[in-house]
Amino acid sequence: RWLRPIVVGGVLLDIVAASLLAHALPGASAGISMSLLFNIAAAATLLPLSWGLVLALAASVATAAEYLWKVLEGGDPTRTLAELAMFATSYLALAFISYQVGNRARRNQQLANQRGDEVANLFQINELIIRRMRTGVVVVDADNRITLANEAASILLGDADGNSDSGRLDLASVAPELARRLQRWRNGWAQDEMPLQLNPDQPEVQPRFARLLAGSDLVLVFLDDSSVVSRRAESLTLSAMGRFSASLAHEIRNPLAAINYAVQLLEEGTGFNESDRRLLQIIHQQCQRTNGIVESVLGLARRERANPENVDLAAFVRRFVLEYKQGQTLETDSIEPIINDTSVPAQVDPRHLYQVLTVLVHNALKYGRIGEQPARVRLRVAQHERSAVIDVMDRGPGIPETVAAQLFRPFFTTSEHGTGLGLYIARELCRANQARLDYIPVPAGGSCFRLVLPGPHTLLPH
């Protein structure tokens, strides 16, 4: 806004001064009028078209006025009417052309600034994506020095803070085995497919190497978490096992049902001693265990996609506890809800939540007791920021660290009658609902399995 009055005022002063000077120096009037062309052109470049044409018209009027002034004084005019018309036309034409040139230059500058902002944004987006990738990315120069590393790679290399700037560390000093594999790859050897562990506290990784540019000494090192690949392979194995078991379920269940029925008939007989009845009981128990394994594996095969709904966990847990008590014989054991809030909303598939709570409560009643004491299971429901939390707690002996690390692995069990699939299926159901199931050690004794569910408004901005 401050530029327009300065330019307009300056050009008007130039026009007045040029007119007075042309009147005082008749012999130089043509050169003085021509010098105004540069002023008009510069002003039209900086100003809107209307202002540029106004200044050009003002210069034309001033030139004509100076001519009339000379005539009225009775002097001999030094220029002709054709010359005046030429200058007036030149002023207007040059003003229009200069405006077009300036306007195009401004549009090009604006487009260049816009493209520059887009490139800067894309650069920042790419940098953020690389920094946040779960796959570690390291750039190594010809001297085996780390020039760049994203957060995942920094953590894998031993930087607990996950800083992306590794300060050009020597790769051989940070990860000797990785440096050795990189050197072998540079020498033309085939890549070693065996995973390696860069840090004792970090998972094993599978390194991959690629040149940044053709003929460049910079090498990109990708560090893939091999545990992710293992989990995918494990999931595929279980899925294949589930489909295979589904095809054999009918054939497996028929003999199991026949064996169970035969055992029941034998148990009704009177010609068996205690030792024979014990054998019949073992047969009956093993049939039930085999049937449980088939049901669990079939559950993996036919698991449906989650259909999350808005659920009030306070009312849901109260109803679950009531139905569980009605359907199970607890005798001296107890199960109670602990709910302080009147309503705890969450998004979850009610069928999946019911199945997960059934597994957790069943395990708590089975393992959450000390000796012959009755089991006490508590289901605590609470709201935590944007998430809802359900804690399934018992007062048993707790779970050793070595066992806790394998709790959610398929087919892992400490019971001779267990299938080892309950907690695994429960966690998979939680993942299908974008929830989280964790084991929380209790220092005072007992165990706690925490189920963290997304709230109904998790996508709202903070």
Image (cartoon, rainbow, N blue to C red):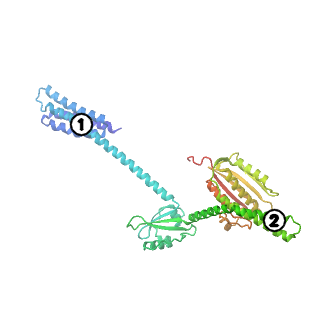
**In front: label 1 or label 2:** 2
- The quadrant holding residue 266 is bottom right
Q: Position of residue 189 (x, y in %)?
A: 45, 74
Q: Is 45 displayed left or right of 407 in the figure?
A: left
**Residue marked by disc 2:** 263
- Which numbered disc flags the more N-terminal residue, 1 or 2? 1
Going by the numbered disc 1, the residue's amino acid type is Ala
Give whichever of 282, 317 is nearer the camera.
Answer: 282
Q: Which mark is residue 33?
A: none
Q: Quadrant of the N terminus?
A: top left
Q: Is residue 53 above or below residue 275?
A: above
**Residue marked by disc 1:** 93
The local crowd at label 2, few if under 14, some if 14 to 19, many if 20 or more residues have their Cα within 10 Å, is some
Q: Position of residue 396 (x, y in %)?
A: 75, 62
SS at circle 2: helix
Q: Is 169 displayed left or right of 326 in the figure?
A: left
Residue 397 shows in this picture: no
Q: Is 166 displayed left or right of 35 in the figure?
A: right
